Amino acid sequence: MALSMKCNVKSVFRFIHKSNSYRILFKAGKATGTTSLPKGQVFSGIQPTGVPHLGNYLGALESWVALQDEYSTVMYSIVDLHSITQPQDPQLLRDNILDMAASLLACGIDPTRSILFQQSQVSEHAELSWILGCLTSMPRLRHLPQWKMKSKQKNEGSVGLYTYPVLQAADILLYKSTHVPVGEDQIQHLELAQDLARIFNNQYGEFFPEPRALLSVTRKVKSLRDPSSKMSKSDPQKLSTVFLTDTPDDIVFKIRRAVTDFTSEVTYEPESRPGVSNLVSMHAAVSGQSVEEVVRLAEGMDTGQYKNVVAEAIVQKLQPIRLEIQRLRADRGHLESLLAKGAEKARSLAAPVMTEVRKLVGFY
């Protein structure tokens, strides 16, 4: 989620939090000098595009769970308004929203420690998006990488696709969020939220905080069939992606078929041996060990033997999550009730913010 402020190494300070699962980016001149993670308000969203895969879990969801113990208010939204920038089957979308809710709960998102809700059930998101859109220039949006990439793929793009970064900014600012867990590919969208906070504040008076990015430091999980690409739900190669609902047999089969190379030794050399290095990285992440430790443990094994070790480690990590997703999926009423309660909590925070925004803008 993003805006203007060119982001480079010179313009940010980075430090690693003690949990080693995420880092915080401060703009130059804003760092406090302390190494303790500040309390604040966290917001992030995830599209309901089906059950998450291992890369989603290790790259984002595991950190989301940890953040529940680190910040005073943590909000996670299933951003269904964003999902309709692409054509959706209505019944499939309804199912995917509940599947995503089940997946997040199974991974450890706890409604007693965070607010989990469905974006479209809080109308203030769309209202603030319109107001912020009126403060955003078309050239500013046109230069965002996601628009250039997705519109090129489709040869044209919808108005919703063009303006969805403004809705992302509204998602964040609506709750006066101070921190946003994002991937590096979303930094420019977060900069948009920072810019819009400044523009609004300059025009109407100091109101919105400028949110800071929390970047996961977990290594990106690569495709099992093409380690030059990220693991993806949309990958047409069915053996490339490990889903949280895969059975142990599914996982073992996919890992055994993972692309490696003709060298039998297990080493971590991402540039020259991306396939084996991807297995090492996944093994380290799911086991909680360092890359050096898992490579040391693999001494004397060939890559075929090592694949069995990696598969077993992934099975042990994901099996409880898979079983919990199955249990939660069986009770749609429970999931719908949890999301309704989350939306009520979210609205209680959004409503007073929008009341003040309306007053500042001059609506009353």
Image: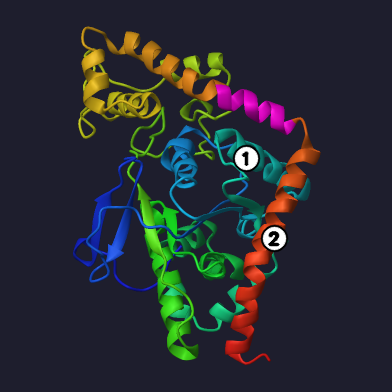
The front one of 123 and 116 is: 116
- The answer to whether residue 76 is visible is yes
Q: Is residue 88 visible?
A: no
What kind of element bears circle 1? loop
Q: Residues within 10 Å of mark 1 (few under 14, many from 20)?
A: some
Kindly report the secondary structure that dominates the magenta region of the rendered protein. helix
Image quarter of the C terminus = bottom right
Residue plotted at (31% across, 46% down): 17
Q: State how the image is colored.
A: rainbow
Label 1 is placed on what type of residue? Gly
Residue at x 26%, y 8% (from the top left corner): 301
Q: Position of residue 213 (x, y in %)?
A: 38, 59
Residue at image x 60%, y 25%?
A: 322
- Between disc 1 and disc 2, the foreground one is 2
- Quarter of image, res 186: bottom left
Q: Quadrant of residue 100?
A: top right
338 is within the stretch colored magenta: no
Q: Earlier in the sequence, mark 1 or mark 2?
A: 1
| Residue at disc 2, secondary structure | helix
Between the residue at mark 1 and the residue at mark 2, the CA separation in whole angstroms equals: 17 Å
Magenta part of the chain: 320-329
- Residue under pointer 1: 50
Which residue was labeled with disc 2? Answer: 120
Residue 63 vs 120, above or below: the answer is above
Q: Amino acid at mark 2?
A: Ser
Residue 213 higher or lower than 90, as above or below: below
* In this rendering, position of residue 218 left or right of residue 136: left
The image position of residue 297, as x and y in percent, is: 25, 14
On the image, the x and y values in percent for residue 298 come to 26, 13
